[in-house]
Image (tube, grey):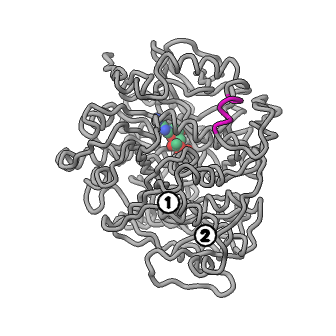
Amino acid sequence: MSETIFPVPAEVAERAHVDNAKYLEMYKQSVENPDAFWGEHGKRIDWIKPFSKVKNTSYDYHNVSIKWFEDGTLNVSANCVDRHLATRGDQPAIIWEGDDPSESKVITYKQLHHEVNVFANVLHAKGVKKGDRVTIYLPMIPEAAYAMLACARIGAVHSIVFGGFSPDSLAQRIEGCASKCVITADEGLRGGRKVPLKANVDKAAEKAPVDTVIVVKRTGGDIKMTEGRDVWYHEEADRVSDHCAPVEMNAEDPLFILYTSGSTGQPKGVLHTSGGYLVYASMTHQYVFDYHDGDVYWCTADVGWVTGHSYIVYGPLANGATTLMFEGVPTYPDASRFWQVIDKHNVNIFYTAPTAIRALMGAGNELVEKTSRKSLKLLGSVGEPINPEAWTWYYNVVGEKRCPIVDTWWQTETGGILITPLPGATDLKPGSATRPFFGVQPAIVDAEGNFLEGATEGNLVITDSWPGQMRTVYGDHDRFVQTYFATYKGLYFTGDGCRRDEDGYYWITGRVDDVINVSGHRMGTAEVESALVSHPKVSEAAVVGYPHDIKGQGIYAYVTLMEGEEPTDALKKELVNHVRSEIGPIASPDLIQFSPGLPKTRSGKIMRRILRKIAEDSFDNLGDTSTLADPAVVDDLIDNRQNRH
Ligand code: 6R9
């Protein structure tokens, strides 16, 4: 296989924080002496009481425990806001670009300080205390960042729920962490369309009652306010002072919970704590994006995902960066929007997802070429493997061969980027996330857990802890241990497949468990199946992913109907709508196949391997089907497959 290599341009290496020699030296130190390395880099943030211990972690299956900087104290919001006032009070902290191109605003660090203090006092006034969980269900407006930092300021633990999730999903996440307070907006605005956020909260609260709903006015749309429970944010804000002292938090006090999908059961509440998370988020943000003072940095994620937490809010703001926050979508008013926003705000660093790149690539080069993009220095990618075609287009057309691309591999669980190029240090290969960040020790194991050396392919594990790692599944430490440390005892299992080449570069090949990645969003097949079988006409369902040109993976559902139900197109539509209302639009099945039977072993286990092959339209080699209870179901599945090339 011929592989194109893009060497580090000399001028990039020169301006970068680290070149290759420095990377190698720092990496070596970071894994040989993590205490010394992180003891030094832990000082990049402000501590109220400095830590004396650095790393105290165990991957031992019987005693998984992860603590970093455990006797230090700090406040995350003071680190992201207050400490910049003296040096950059008038510098933009957040540039907000609205859904409508005529709407944007700049929030300086001084203004951010004011807003966060006020928001924190509103929370206090509503009775929110240190350790309480607060659910945030907001669109991409500055108040989302204020609310996060306000929670951090008073020691409350935020749990953000993506605005695209349904009332049921929201209710599940409110209940999951026993949150008593929800922060939302009247409506969201995306691509010119309104999202009924407050109405969704009302529905969710029927199932998961809360004491307080704080409503930010965004569109001014008509909503219902429930007396005694719901308050307008702007009215409460008028009543409080703009001074709220940051609470002293232990390094290991929780900062946030974020629900994410796994291969089994309902989404789990990934818990991140304060000190290690902030050190890791800020350090990766500085080095991976080679952030320098004055750069304008834009990550297009939503704060409802981990990328928004670490690389729109916490990492950049801890570094005193200017971070752009975008309310809209890449294709509104047209598919040139990203490039226009880059020109409008002189964006230097741009970080987005392969699914957006593929969609915009399909819209044609003219939409890119009519814009200047001369401010751009660096491009980033996250969320799923980037195919070399999309990489090459991003590099040639968007970056005009001048901007390195950092393909960053990481997970909700990892808190920050683990495998990535560093722009001044790493020669690029399209499609490869390349090499580990400082302190990260990846390894590849086979199905039995044997380490595979050299150029090889297998399952990706990490052999030791880094400061940004999740600490537990909220309220269920055993689930944490079982999910991540039981498959290969003593190792953190990522759930991803991976290849390592002759140069030691890592190539993530996608999930090896029952998680699918749709447009960079994680979905457990089990969640979609359980939504389908909750429909009265469905008796059984099996869901798999299949290759999709734009989304990366599409959702393919095999559905067995109840006795006597007619398999009609109308019913397919009904089922799609049912899943949308149970989980949210991101979980909509792309293809539904009605199947009278599913391929099961004699012990009743569905053979997903077969279902995946048929969904991929590659059923010539189905492998061994002799253990099937009824091999004839396979022929019917093939005859009626929905994805024909
Ligand atoms: C940050 C984020 C995590 C899963 C992960 C992997 C996939 C993310 C990737 C990538 C290949 C990359 N993934 N980045 N695969 N190359 N650069 O996306 O977190 O939503 O938890 O998803 O996404 O499969 O395991 P999360």
Is residue 318 shown left or right of residue 57? left
Q: Residue furthest front?
A: 86
Q: Amino acid at mark 2?
A: Ile
For the point 69% across and 40% down, the residue is 276
Q: Quadrant of residue 496?
A: top right
| Of residues 18 and 91, the one drawn nearer to the viewer in this rendering | 91
For the point 33% across and 18% down, the residue is 3
* Majority secondary structure in the magenta region: helix
Q: Quadrant of residue 231?
A: bottom right
Question: Mark 1: is the Cβ under 8 angstroms from ligand 1?
Answer: no
Query: Is residue 162 rendered magenta in the image?
Result: no
Estimate how packed mark 2 is, as few (under 14), some (14 to 19) or many (20 or more) residues with alpha carbons within 10 Å.
many
Secondary structure of the residue carrying tag 2 is strand
Q: Amino acid at mark 1?
A: Leu
Q: Is residue 381 above or below residue 508?
A: below
Q: Which residue is mark 1?
A: 561
Q: Which residue is mark 2?
A: 183
* Quadrant into which the C terminus falls: top left
Estimate how packed mark 1 is, as few (under 14), some (14 to 19) or many (20 or more) residues with alpha carbons within 10 Å.
many
| Of residues 401 and 459, the one drawn nearer to the viewer in this rendering | 401
| Of residues 77 and 353, the one drawn nearer to the viewer in this rendering | 77
> How far across and down, in percent of the image, does residue 17 sit?
48, 28
Q: Where are the magenta residues, as a range?
A: 38-44
Q: Residue furthest bottom?
A: 227
Q: Is residue 294 visible?
A: yes
| Cα distance in 3D space between marks 2 and 1 | 40 Å
Is residue 629 shown left or right of residue 368? right
Secondary structure of the residue carrying tag 1 is strand
For the point 66% across and 66% down, the residue is 120
Question: Mark 2: is the Cβ under 8 angstroms from ligand 1?
Answer: no
Q: Mark 2 or mark 1, which is nearer to you?
A: 2
